[in-house]
Amino acid sequence: MTPIGLRARVSAAFAIGALLLSACVTVVSYELIRNTLFAERERTAVRATYFDAAIVTADVAGADPELGEVLRGLDTGADRYVLLHRDGRWYSRSAEPVSETTVPARLQAMTAGGQAGAQRVSRDGQPALIIGVPLPGDMTFYEIVSLRELERTLQLLALVLTAVAIMVAAGGAAVGWYVTRHALRPLAAVAGAARGIAAGDLATRLDPDTEPDLAVLSEAFNDMAGQLSRRRERDRRFAADVSHELRSPLQTLEAAVSVLERRKDRLDERSASAVGLIAAEVERFQALVNDLLELARSDQPVHREPVVIAELLRGICRSRGLEADLVAIVPGTPEVWTVDRRRVEQALGNLIDNAIRYGGGPVAVRAGRTSDGLASDDFFLEVDDAGPGIDEVDRPTIFDRFVRGPAAGARGAGDGTGLGLAIVAEHAAAHGGRAQVSDRPGGGARFRLELPGSV
């Protein structure tokens, strides 16, 4: 399960907090408004009921009044319904008989005891309020007030408050997203600086004054980068010093071994074989020292110069006894590239040597323009070999230093230094590019050197 990002979590927390707060405010506001409206409606209904009850009391004071006519004479409007209970009989404005269940028994008992009262009921599926007022002469006046309009008003209010709560929650999420975006911007700068360090730009630093709250982090990062830079410089100097110090005794050994090799025919078979082994190891040791020296100065700036790329590739092939027709220039590729000749020559030479030593020999050396969505001035060099290819598990480390084990052992002899492909990667990075390996269509490996902005 993919973990939820910090920005999403903070935005969700803002949204949930805003939703809870707005929900609480909505519920409290709704209840306060509802109680206020109901109380006001009830007070108004009670006043109207007492007013109508006074009119009824005055009208029935005469001899033998017509109670239906009395009730019909009341101005009750469309939202009020009146009843009169007298001598066990019910009277209303209409000629239809009144059911005894219209008025709740509890309210009837209350008014029968001489006490006025009110009760909310449901009448014909609609909310209503019944108010009962005892009258002189063993009469009780009831007025049923419809609460339908008030209920509709409350429903509309609930809908509006719910919409407001949702909008507040959405606003909280937006605020959370905005806040985290700006709050994480310094961390994005730290991440970018870390990527720069990882890419080899050890001069990358953070400005502590940009974000005072992250000043400690910025200073710690800068200190780490400074120590890393100093350590890398010490390692580079150490490798360079050791390599320089080894060159003198190596030259002496090489001279002595060359003397022994010239007189090898005078030695017995075992001695001659030992001299051959010593000569091979001295040659390998010399190659290792040269590679270490090359890596020690690989962080120096590139020295770009115009180079006719086809001539450079053919010259590298001829220097290794390969046919010049191995070189293929992709149509549309400029003839002249602006690159560091020495670095490109060594990087491509190492790839060709790698193909000869481990890959059954190169089958193609190609130059062209990239077409994978990178900038239009990015170009590549490729070397295809006829070997067994590179396993997927070995590709992430194939360009690391001294990596030879399964990658080299599975592809041929083990007499390399383990630094050739590392030098290729260093020269590619010095140009701002990269080195990578993939499968060649039809079998084998394809090593690719990309040189952004090299033309």
Image (cartoon, rainbow, N blue to C red):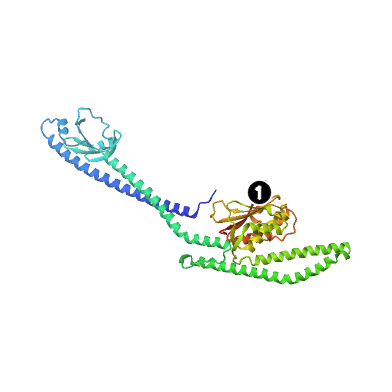
Of 143 and 276, nearer the camera is 276
Q: Is residue 17 at all visible to an observer of this figure?
A: no
Q: Position of residue 226 (x, y in %)?
A: 57, 69
| Image label count | 1
Residue 325 in the image, given as x and y percentages of width and height = 68, 52
**Placement of 150 over or under 238, stated as above or below:** above
Displayed quadrant of residue 287: bottom right
- Disc 1 on helix, strand or loop? loop
328 to the left or right of 190: right
Please name the residue shown 72% across and 58% down the image: 320
Indicate the quadrant where residue 131 lies.
Answer: top left
407 left or right, relative to 192: right
Q: Farthest residue to the top: give it.
A: 96
Question: Foreground residue, 285 or 404?
Answer: 285
The vertical placement of 50 against 370, above or below, is above
Q: Position of residue 421 (x, y in %)?
A: 67, 58
Q: Neighbour class for label 1 at 10 Å: few (<14), some, many (≥20)?
A: some
Q: Tell which of 435 and 414 is nearer to you.
A: 435
Classify the position of the C terminus by image quarter: bottom right
In the figure, is residue 129 to the left or right of 279?
left
Residue 106, given in percent of the width and then of the height, sits at: 28, 37
Kindly give the residue lying farthest to the left in the view shown: 63
Image point 33% across, 46% down: which residue? 160
Q: Residue 73: in sight, yes or no?
A: yes
Which residue is tagged 1?
A: 440
The amino acid pointed to by label 1 is Arg
